[in-house]
Amino acid sequence: VQLQASGGGLVQAGGSLRLSCAASGSIFRINDMRWYRQAPGKQRELVAGITSGGSKNYADSVKGRFTISRDNGKNTLYLQMNSLKPEDTAVYYCNARIALLLYWGQGTQVTVSS
C-alpha cells in the first residue's frame, strides 16, 4: 500500500489550497485517515481526521478554515485549506489505517507568505 500526497505549493496569506492523498495497492477497506503537519523545528501535529463513517475532527488552530473529506470509491483523502495564514506553513503528511496497519504519505510542502 502507498499513499501519495499532492497539492502543496506557495500561496499568499488569505489564499486557498487543496491537498489530496491517494492510496493505492491491495486495499480492502480504509479506516481512519488523517492529515498531520510539521513546521521547521516543531513536532508533527494532527491537523484533521476523518473516520470511515465520515466523522471529522480538527485542531483548534484550523477549525472554520480547513475541511477534511474523503472519497471512498477513489481511496482518496482531501484537505481544503482556506484563509491560509503564515503559521500554516509546514510539510503536510497524510496517513491511513488499513487492516490495523498505519501508512504514511511522503509529505507535501505548503508555504504561506505574508
Image (cartoon, rainbow, N blue to C red):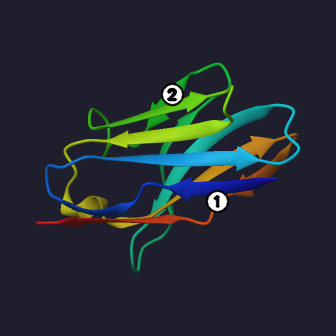
Query: Mark 1 falls on what kind of element?
Result: loop
Q: Residues within 10 Å of mark 1 (few under 14, many from 20)?
A: some
Q: Is residue 68 above or below residue 45?
A: above
Identify the residue under disc 2.
56
Q: Which mark is in front, 2 or 1?
A: 1
Screen quadrant of the C terminus: bottom left
Q: Give me the residue at 76% from left, 34% from top.
A: 30
Whole-percent x, y for residue 29 in the image: 82, 31
| Element at label 2 | strand
Q: Is residue 91 above or below residue 15?
A: below
In front here: 109 or 65?
Answer: 109
Q: Callout 1, which amino acid?
A: Gly
Q: Residue at x 29, y 59 (%)?
A: 88
Query: Which residue is rendered at x = 75% and y = 56% of the image?
Result: 2
* Residue 66 relative to residue 33: left or right: left
30 relative to 28 in the view: left or right:
left
Q: Quadrant of residue 50?
A: top right
The residue that appears at 39% across and 78% down in the rendered structure is 40
Q: CA distance from mark 2 to mark 1?
A: 20 Å
Q: Which mark is residue 105?
A: 1
Give amino acid for label 2: Lys
Which quadrant holds residue 58?
top left
Between 110 and 56, the one nearer to me in the picture:
110
**x and y percentages locating residue 112 in the rendered image:** 23, 63
Q: Earlier in the sequence, mark 2 or mark 1?
A: 2
